[in-house]
Structure formats: structure tokens, C-alpha cells
Amino acid sequence: MAEIKQTSLPGVLEIFPRVFPDSRGYFFESFRQDWLDKMGVHESWVQDNQSFSQKGTVRGIHFQQGEHAQAKLVRVIAGKVLDVAVDLRKGSSTFGQVYSTILDAEKNNLLYIPAGFGHGFSVLSEIAVFSYKCDNFYNKESEKG
């Protein structure tokens, strides 16, 4: 089972899957819905995105507004990034507060970011392949940054 940590921002979770290394390499489950279910998160994922970036690239802070807001489950497939979530939910006790962590392909850690948060990352390694699940489809008119 994965280790799941509640971060300093309520609802933002960092997930550390169990990795099984052997002489051939390794195996791990990169996603299981029951990990999130156990934490009270019941998303229906509808879109997967992937990006490739070079060292020093900054992507974000991005978010979608209103009915197009997206929860995200993010991870790095290759490389390392400084990942940032910002609480943009007006009226939230943590409005404007930030959580950051290093997502690292060698650790295979993931970050769950609820709808209503901004998200971005900065590439720390020579390259990074970044992957994320979304619970809502991308809508250009609702995108902000």
C-alpha cells in the first residue's frame, strides 16, 4: 500500500507508492483509486496530460475557474521538479497559502491537488516528463494563470 501524507493545505495529499525493485529494474503501481478513496477523495478522472520540459522551465501557476475547475493528480515520469499548489478558494482558511514539494521520478511520489487550487512547477533536472490526471476536461475560456 502507498504511504499517503496530508500536507499543510487541507485536501492536498502527497502519495508515496511502494516500489518493488529487483535485478531487472523495478515495478510500482503509479495509481490506485482506493488510495484516494481511503482519504475521502472520490474523483472521476476524465483526462490525462503529459508535458516535456527542459531545466529551468517554469509552468504555471495555472487553474481553471468555475464549473471547469479541475482536481489534479500529478507526478514526474522522468526528472525532478519543484511542484507548487496554491489555495485559491475564496473563504478557505488557507486561502493564498502555498504548499511545495519536490516530485522526483526516483521517488515516484505524486501530489493530489483538489479543484480550486492553482498549480505550477519548475524543472530542476536536465529534463522532466510530467504527467497528470484531471477530473474535468480542459476549457480554454476558463483557464487562468
Image: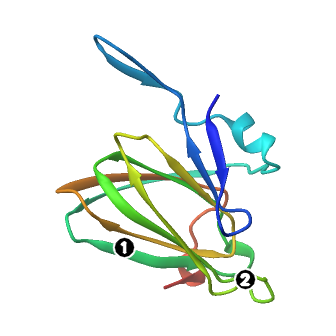
* Contact (Cβ within 8 Å) of mark 2 with mark 1: no
Secondary structure at badge 2 equals: loop
What label sits on residue 59 in the rendered view? 1
N-term-proximal mark, 2 vs 1: 1
Q: Nearer the viewer, residue 103 or 116?
A: 103
Q: Quadrant of residue 20?
A: top left
**For the point 48% across and 45% down, which residue is it?**
109
What label sits on residue 89 in the rendered view? 2
- Compared to 137, does 23 lie above or below? above
Q: How many marks?
A: 2
Density class for disc 1 (Cα within 10 Å; few <14, some 14-19, many ≥20) is: some
- Compared to 109, does 13 lie above or below? below
Q: Position of residue 76 (x, y in %)?
A: 39, 49
Secondary structure at badge 1 equals: strand
Q: Nearer the viewer, residue 136 or 121?
A: 121
Q: Position of residue 11 (x, y in %)?
A: 73, 62
Q: Position of residue 132 (x, y in %)?
A: 50, 53
**For the point 70% across and 38% down, which residue is it?**
35
What amino acid is found at the position of numbered circle 1 in the picture? Arg
Q: Quadrant of residue 3?
A: top right
- Compared to 125, does 15 lie above or below? above
Lateral position of residue 126 relative to residue 11, left or right: left
- Looking at the figure, which quarter contains the N terminus? top right
Residue farthest left in this picture: 126
Q: CA distance from mark 2 to mark 1?
A: 21 Å
Density class for disc 2 (Cα within 10 Å; few <14, some 14-19, many ≥20) is: some
**For the point 66% across and 62% down, which residue is it?**
12
What amino acid is found at the position of numbered circle 2 in the picture? Arg
Colour convention: rainbow
Q: Position of residue 16 (x, y in %)?
A: 54, 41
Q: Nearer the viewer, residue 116 or 138?
A: 116
